[in-house]
Every structure is written in structure tokens, then in C-alpha cells.
Amino acid sequence: MESLKKNYPFTAIVGQEKMKKALILNIINPLLAGVLIRGEKGTAKSTAVRALAELLPEREQVEGCVFGCDPADASLMCSSCAEKKDQGINLEVIFAKMKVIDLPVSATEDRVVGTLDIEHAIKKGEKKFDPGILAQANRNILYVDEVNLLDDHVVDVLLDSAAMGVNTIEREGVSFFHPARFILVGTMNPEEGDLRPQLLDRFGLVVDVAGEKDTARRIEVIKRRLEFEVPLQAAWGSEF
Ligand SMILES: [Zn+2]
């Protein structure tokens, strides 16, 4: 059912103006280095991030490249695309929207950075890389819910990639790197613990969100939710 699942529209989110503005500003200029959204549960944090990606137009990317390289920018390409371009091989181009890549708090370091097949490197003399979350995140939004609960090792690799725009994997003397430029969006509930200062510094913008207190606006939130969900339930029955 995944492909049929519609995102709640960005423009239908009631209030939360600071959060919406911070997200839009990062889309306009990714050099703002991400947004940290702090607030209790039920403040449309995750909805807003997913809805934002939905608003964006499709852009070009190299077909078949797991890093989604930009065919127009050789300086930020992965080694495979850059090599093909150097050799004059035509890179097939497809159009695709920016995606929201989730980084679950339970993710291991390997899952985040990807893995190198050392045995393959030794036997065949070539690198075989199994991409991780940072590979998928290139040119996309990397969304970390409960970012304050991330494992320290994962925080370290995240900080390195965010700073360099490159993910480097080193195992037993073999190394591999690929572009990892992403818009970092983290959410956290401050009641569940603080964020490491180094990670907090990494976010360009921090916004605090709170649930809507005004009764009329709360009613509007519920009304819009129902209007969005009821037609979907009718169309898809109990599976939704
Ligand atoms: Zn590539």
C-alpha cells in the first residue's frame, strides 16, 4: 500500500509557522545546515517534514546510481558516475523528487555508513560497497526522529558526513567514500533528554514547537485531519 499512501499536505498544517518557515528556508538554501525541531509529541513535526518533500518539483538524477548523483555537477559525483563521465560514457538521466530518508534511533553504525566487503576486496582486488542510510540521504532530507536518543557512534559519523558532505568508510586498510550531502532534520522531545552540544551546534536552525492551545484552532486541526483521512478510508477500506 506504500505507493498509494498520500502525505498530508504542507499547506493544510494549522499554525506551527516557525517550524514551517525553518523547513522552507532549508530547502531554499541547504547551506543553512538543517533544522532541529524541539517539542512534545503530536505537534505535526514528522508530518511537516514529509509534506515538505512532497511540495518540491522533480529534479534530474543519474539513473541507477544509489547516491542519486546530479548529472550536471561532476564535482559532487560518486566515483562511479565521475569515472563514466570522464570516459565520455553518457549518463542516463531520470527525474525524481527529493526524498525523506529516515534514520531510526535503533540504526547501527554499519546500517548508517554502509559496509565494505573486505573478502571481495582481497580476492578480486576491487571494492564492493553495500550502501547505507547516508548513501540514500545524498541530495535528500535525512530525518532523525528522537535525535537526542541516537547512539554516540552514529552521532559521530553523522557529524563527520554533515561537515564534509562525504561519507568515508574504512575497514582493514580498505577505504571507500561517496558524496553524502543532505538536509538534516532532527526532532526531539526535550523531556526525554538533552542533545550533545556538538550535535546541537550542527543544526543551523532550532525551533521550539508546542501544541495548539487555542480551542478554535484545535478544532480546525481536527477538522482538516478528518477531511484528509475520511476520503482515503472510503477508497481503501480497512487497510489504511
Ligand atoms: Zn553517482
Image (spheres, helix red, strand yellow):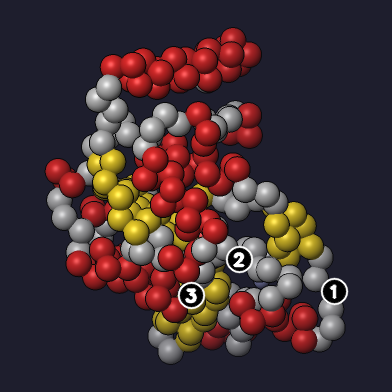
Q: CA distance from mark 2 to mark 1?
A: 17 Å
Lateral position of residue 59 relative to residue 139, left or right: right
Residue at point 50% right, 29% down? 12
Tell me the mark number nearer the camera, choosing from 3 and 2. 3
Lateral position of residue 202 relative to residue 48, left or right: left
Residue on which disc 1 sits: 90
**Mark linked to residue 107:** none
Tell me the mark number nearer the camera, choosing from 3 and 1. 3
Q: Identify the secondary structure beneath mark 2.
A: loop
Residue 56 horizontal/vertical position (percent)? 62, 48
Residue 191 horizontal/vertical position (percent)? 14, 43
Circle 2 crowding by C-alpha within 10 Å: few under 14, some 14–19, many from 20:
many
Q: Identify the secondary structure beneath mark 1.
A: loop
Vertical placement of 212 versus 224: above or below?
Answer: below
Task: Give the image quarter of residue 178.
Answer: bottom right
Give the mark nearest the N terminus, 2 or 1. 2
Q: Nearer the viewer, residue 217 or 230?
A: 217
Residue on which disc 3 sits: 165
Query: Where in the image, quadrant-wise, is ligand 1 located?
Result: bottom right
- Mark 2, ligand 1, within 8 Å: the answer is yes
Circle 3 crowding by C-alpha within 10 Å: few under 14, some 14–19, many from 20:
some
Residue on which disc 2 sits: 67
Lateral position of residue 178 relative to residue 199, left or right: right
Vertical placement of 24 versus 93: above or below?
Answer: above
Q: Quadrant of the N terminus?
A: top right
**Kind of residue at disc 2:** Phe
**Kind of residue at disc 3:** Gly
Give the mark nearest the N terminus, 3 or 1. 1
Residue at point 25% right, 41% down? 39
